[in-house]
Image (cartoon, grey):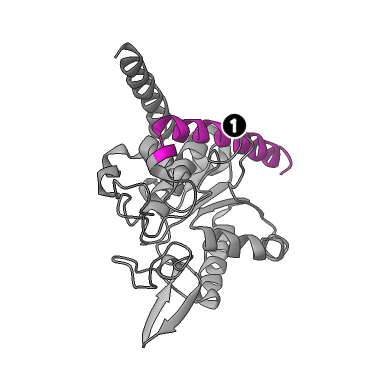
């Protein structure tokens, strides 16, 4: 009993610390006045781009899990290093095919046979766009950020979106004379990166830490032999916890702050 109370107290303290990290400064681009924008860009010409989706993340996580996680973490970085956080995307690329006249993408089909289920259109997913349209959207964003005086862009979120931008980042950095970084990194072992699985240990733990009111673990099958639909990674029923989420946030905050401060010093 004492141990469980102590654990709960530690979680509350850590939650308060993280909330303080994201609420200490006004960092959302859409909320800034021109004066506030000028001040933040003068301090650190960094824009943070959350790559969200409206996508099935198991029965236990919200459909906007990608954007919620990436925006939260990018706000932490903006408060620590400086810069501004852009409005999140909710459209992005993914694997896609047509079955019986229906478009199936992402977790509709991913590893379905391996987990003993049929491919199906999962409720709520509504985000897919082609690679070419996604590239055009990101490139248009970079053009506008360059115009606004941004010199560093940090992007992160939906796995396929982050991967696609990374594949083009060398080209775009040269074309627009900007630096670009994503937030993948897992130095402390599996589960301690930022969004390194799909609705499994890592993402569930992150949302337990970031938005505990949105996590509904009771929606998952109680029978551990029944694998949750649309979950890929270590079983969240066994391995997810707020402590893992807080540890991932702190680990990656420290890593990314070091990278970004070094990038700022080189401008």
Tell whether 5 sits left or right of 79.
left
Q: Report if residue 107 is visible in the image.
A: yes
Residue beneath the point at 49% across and 43% down: 74
Could you say where residue 108 lies in the image, as x and y percent from the top left?
A: 40, 69
Q: Residue furthest top?
A: 2
Q: Residue furthest bottom?
A: 101
Residue beneath the point at 41% across and 44% down: 236
Residue behind mark 1: 254
Q: How many marks?
A: 1
Residue beneath the point at 38% across and 50% down: 225
Magenta range: 238-267
Q: Is residue 6 above or below residue 102?
A: above
SS at mark 1 in the image: helix
Seen from the viewer's position, the closer of residues 168 and 159 is 159
Q: Quadrant of the N terminus?
A: top left
- Predominant secondary structure in magenta? helix
Could you say where residue 185 lies in the image, as x and y percent from the top left?
A: 62, 43
Q: Quadrant of the C terminus?
A: top right
The quadrant where residue 3 appears: top left
């Amino acid at each position: 009993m004492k141990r469980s109370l102590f654990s709960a107290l530690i979680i509350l303290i850590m939650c308060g610390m993280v909330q303080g990290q994201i609420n200490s400064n006004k960092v959302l681009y859409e909320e800034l006045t021109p004066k506030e924008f000028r001040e933040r860009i003068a301090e650190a010409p960094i824009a943070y781009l959350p790559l969200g989706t409206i996508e099935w993340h198991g029965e236990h996580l919200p459909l906007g899990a990608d954007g919620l996680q990436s925006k939260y973490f990018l706000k932490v970085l903006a408060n620590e290093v400086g810069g501004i956080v852009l409005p999140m995307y909710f459209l992005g690329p993914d694997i896609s095919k047509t079955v019986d006249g229906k478009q199936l993408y992402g977790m509709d089909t991913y590893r379905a046979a391996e987990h003993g289920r049929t491919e199906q259109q999962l409720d709520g997913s509504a985000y897919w766009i082609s690679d070419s349209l996604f590239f055009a959207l990101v490139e248009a964003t970079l053009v506008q950020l360059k115009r606004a005086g941004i010199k560093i862009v940090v992007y992160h979120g939906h796995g396929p979106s982050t991967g696609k931008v990374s594949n083009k980042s060398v080209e775009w950095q040269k074309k627009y004379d900007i630096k670009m970084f994503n937030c993948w990194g897992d130095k402390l072992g599996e589960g301690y990166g930022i969004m390194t699985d799909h609705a499994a240990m890592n993402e569930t733990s992150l949302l337990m830490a970031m938005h505990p009111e949105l996590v509904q673990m009771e929606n998952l099958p109680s029978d551990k032999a029944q694998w949750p639909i649309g979950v890929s990674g270590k079983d969240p029923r066994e391995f997810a916890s707020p402590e893992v989420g807080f540890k991932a946030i702190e680990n990656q905050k420290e890593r990314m702050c070091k990278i970004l401060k070094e990038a700022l010093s080189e401008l």
